[in-house]
Image: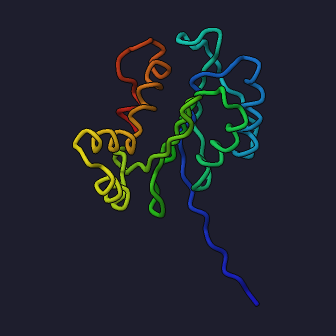
Amino acid sequence: MTYARTAVARTRGVVYLHCVPAALTPHVEWALAAVIGRPVRLEWSLQPVAAPHLRAEAAWAGAVGTAAAIAASLRAWPMLVFEITEDATAASDGERLAYVPGRGFHRSTVAVNGDIVVGEERLRGLSRRATTVEEFRHGLDELLGAAWDAELEPYRTGVPGGPRGLLHEVV
């Protein structure tokens, strides 16, 4: 019996490590290396919003689903603050995963142009549950990850309450 080999769709993305205790930096690099399959050495810099914590970012390339695998590997340290993007391909949607301690994960589907995509069934569910305009607005903010974005913004810019970061324009 012969089996046909299927090509694994490849994509790329960026991991933004917004806030990491200095003692964990080698562990984070090892976790990323385990997912990506090669050694990782990041350039760490001070996170002005949460000194003495550090921040770094790195582009990655891999199979579709690598962003989720990276997020799963970083889950071991619940004190980290991070975001991971994965570009859309011809075979898959893009996504953004964000983690904030105390709030947990938010996962968004991202279109090729960078817009967050909310599925039809999720919108139908929201419209069934919401009994007021305010509940609908709150539910829509939840689907879009507004609370995560609000908490992440100072880390993105390095300035408490600073201007919108580039991530808003790219993702």
Q: Is residue 96 above or below residue 164?
A: below
Q: Is residue 42 above or below residue 1?
A: above
Whole-percent x, y for residue 43 in the image: 65, 21
Q: Residue at x 35, y 33 (%)?
A: 169
* Viewer-closest of 31 and 3: 31
Q: Residue at x 56, y 61 (%)?
A: 9
Q: Is residue 96 above or below residue 1?
A: above
* Viewer-closest of 24 and 79: 79
* Viewer-closest of 28 and 4: 28
Q: Left or right: where does residue 86 sit relative to residue 32? A: left
* Displayed quadrant of residue 127: bottom left
**Farthest left residue?**
133
**Farthest front residue?**
131
Q: Left or right: where does residue 106 sit relative to residue 2? A: left
Whole-percent x, y for residue 142 in the image: 39, 41
Whole-percent x, y for residue 140 in the image: 32, 44
Q: Does residue 17 appear anywhere in the picture? A: yes
Query: Which image quadrant: the C terminus?
Result: top left
* Displayed quadrant of residue 4: bottom right
Q: Residue at x 56, y 36 (%)?
A: 104
Query: Which image quadrant: the N terminus?
Result: bottom right
Total number of numbered labels?
0
**Farthest bottom residue?**
1
Whole-percent x, y for residue 32 in the image: 70, 38
The chosen color scheme is: rainbow
Q: Left or right: where does residue 76 sit relative to residue 96? A: right
Q: Does residue 16 appear anywhere in the picture? A: no
